[in-house]
Image: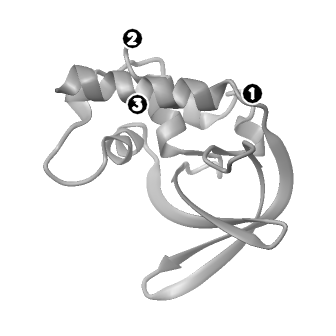
Amino acid sequence: MSALLSSLILAVTLTAQAQDLTCSSGRISQVEFGKIKVESSNYCFNSDKTVLLSRNCQQKKCRAFEDKRRFKIGELLSEVGKPSFRLCRELGGQPEIIEFFVEDQPYKLDRCLFKDGSFADSDFLLAHYLER
């Protein structure tokens, strides 16, 4: 089961990684303690808005991609939560469900936010760190 899940995640995210990214300045919102928090940010996304990276992570030269470890999908599975959220915490990040805007159109994703302000959507991060 975990091998099938790993293969499926890998196939979907490798396709996403091969896509060109568009970078822009925009806003990101999320609900924090019952209130909507909005921040300005520079980020990059793919054409179907399923990949989101902070601009400084576009070339994978940011805190999100510094760790040299690789993980097996079985190490990240649990009864509660997404494997990508567990990975995010393992890497020292904070998983968040966010909304980002492109030309005033909102798109929902989750991201892993690091203390230096860099971030990557959690599935993109998972594809990078999964052992092949």
Q: Position of residue 127 (x, y in %)?
A: 47, 28
Residue 132 is marked as 2
Q: Which mark is residue 9?
A: 3
Kind of residue at disc 1: Gln
Q: Is residue 45 above or below residue 67?
A: below
The CA span between labels 3 and 2 is 11 Å
- CA distance for labels 3 and 1: 21 Å
Residue at x 44%, y 33% (from the top left corner): 126
Numbered disc in front, either 1 or 2: 2
Residue at left offset 25%, top offset 35%: 76
In percent of width and height, residue 18 lies at: 68, 24
| Residue hosting label 1 | 59
Q: Residue 10 in the image: x percent, y percent?
A: 44, 24
Q: Residue furthest left?
A: 79
Identity, as a three-letter code, of the amino acid under mark 2? Arg
Identify the disc placed on residue 92.
Answer: none
How would you rate the neighbour count of disc 3 (Cα within 10 Å): few for under 14, some for 14-19, many for 20 or more?
some
Left or right of residue 76: residue 27? right
Q: Nearer the viewer, residue 126 or 117?
A: 126
Q: Nearer the viewer, residue 64 or 12?
A: 12
Identify the mark nearer the N-term, 1 or 2.
Answer: 1
Extreme residue toward the bottom, this view: 35
Dot 1 falls on a residue whose secondary structure is loop
- For disc 1, the neighbor class at 10 Å (few under 14, some 14 to 19, many from 20) is few
Task: Tell me what residue is drawn at x 76 percent, y 39 percent.
Answer: 56
